[in-house]
């Protein structure tokens, strides 16, 4: 059974860069799409970006200028960086696996809370 | 951008009752790329339905999905206590690639 685990700092200062990693266990990172999704406190879900195991990427236009997603197949990990963060970037950040054909998100990590504050 | 509008925002029902949740797309979409998720407080979303009407692995058959074009429905035939949660519909394929509805909160009456 595939498990996803997010890791990274829980507190980031305004204007700095947020960096998160998702470790995939119980299966290969190959053949799937891998996404980051976030959820601000009390709000809905916002998709941030995905990466295919080959390295092909797609970003939410609203965040594209500040986001980079990358994959390390040797470590079965993919990562997110979000630059120039503000309080509006405070959220629970989830990583998730996307089906290779219809891209529904069938496996999710438990999420990690990131707070932007000085 | 394809906008998904879910209704109602909050649905108050009792265990054993039938729940009908709606998801309306701002333009016609393929049901192949329409999914539903359940989220309990403090937990990650869980895939319920993919392809608008296919139950994900382990999802009980009291959950069903239907619809096409711009109107999609998630139905829970007989509510169990564990079904009271937040529900999101999601579409893949536009720009941004993934969009989510704003959610429907299913609460105990």
Image: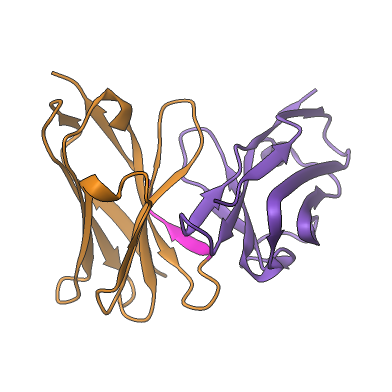
Q: Residue at x 62, y 37 (%)?
A: B103
Left or right: A22, with B102 as reference point: left
Quadrant of image for the C terminus of chain A:
top left
Left or right: B70, with A79 as reference point: right
Q: Which residue is drawn at 36% across and 48% down?
A: A94
Is B72 one of the magenta-colored residues? no
Colour assigned to chain A in the rendering is orange
Q: Residue at x 68, y 41 (%)?
A: B5
> Measured from the top left, where is residue B82 in percent x and y?
67, 40
> Measured from the top left, where is residue A117 in percent x and y?
18, 21
**Picture quadrant of residue B36:** bottom right
Quadrant of image for the N terminus of chain A:
bottom left
Q: Residue at x 70, y 40 (%)?
A: B6
Can I make out residue A50 in this image?
A: yes
- Is the residue B90 above or below the residue A114 in the image? below
Left or right: B49, with A37 as reference point: right
Colour assigned to chain B in the rendering is purple
> Measured from the top left, where is residue B55 in percent x and y?
69, 65
| Residue in the foreground of this view, choosing between A39 and A10 | A39
**Picture quadrant of residue B34:** bottom right
Can I make out residue A90 in this image?
A: no
> Measured from the top left, where is residue A13 in percent x and y?
12, 26
- Is the residue A98 above or below the residue B101 in the image? below
| Residue in the foreground of this view, choosing between A55 and B35 | A55
Residue at the top extreme, as displayed: A118
Q: What segment is highlighted magenta in the picture?
A: A104-110
């Amino acid at each position: 059974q595939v498990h996803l685990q997010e890791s990274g700092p829980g507190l980031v200062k305004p204007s700095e860069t947020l960096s998160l990693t998702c470790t995939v266990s119980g299966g290969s990172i190959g053949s799937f799409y891998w996404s980051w999704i976030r959820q601000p406190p009390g709000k809905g879900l916002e998709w941030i970006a995905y990466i295919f195991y080959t390295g092909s990427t797609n970003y939410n236009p609203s965040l594209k200028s500040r986001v980079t997603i990358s994959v390390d197949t040797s470590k079965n990990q993919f990562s997110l960086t979000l630059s120039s963060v503000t309080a509006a970037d405070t959220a629970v950040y989830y990583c998730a696996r996307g089906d290779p054909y219809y891209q529904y998100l069938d496996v999710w990590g438990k999420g990690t809370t990131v707070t932007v504050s000085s | 951008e394809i906008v998904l509008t879910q209704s109602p925002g909050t649905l108050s029902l009792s265990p054993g009752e039938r729940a009908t949740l709606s998801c309306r797309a701002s333009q016609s979409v393929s049901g192949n790329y329409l999914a539903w998720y359940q989220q309990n407080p403090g937990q990650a979303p869980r895939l319920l339905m993919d392809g608008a009407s296919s139950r994900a692995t382990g999802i009980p058959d009291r959950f069903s999905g239907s619809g096409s074009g711009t109107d999609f429905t998630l139905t829970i035939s007989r509510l169990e206590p564990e079904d009271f949660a937040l529900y999101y519909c999601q579409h893949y394929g536009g720009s941004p690639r993934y969009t989510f509805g704003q959610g429907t909160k299913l609460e105990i009456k």
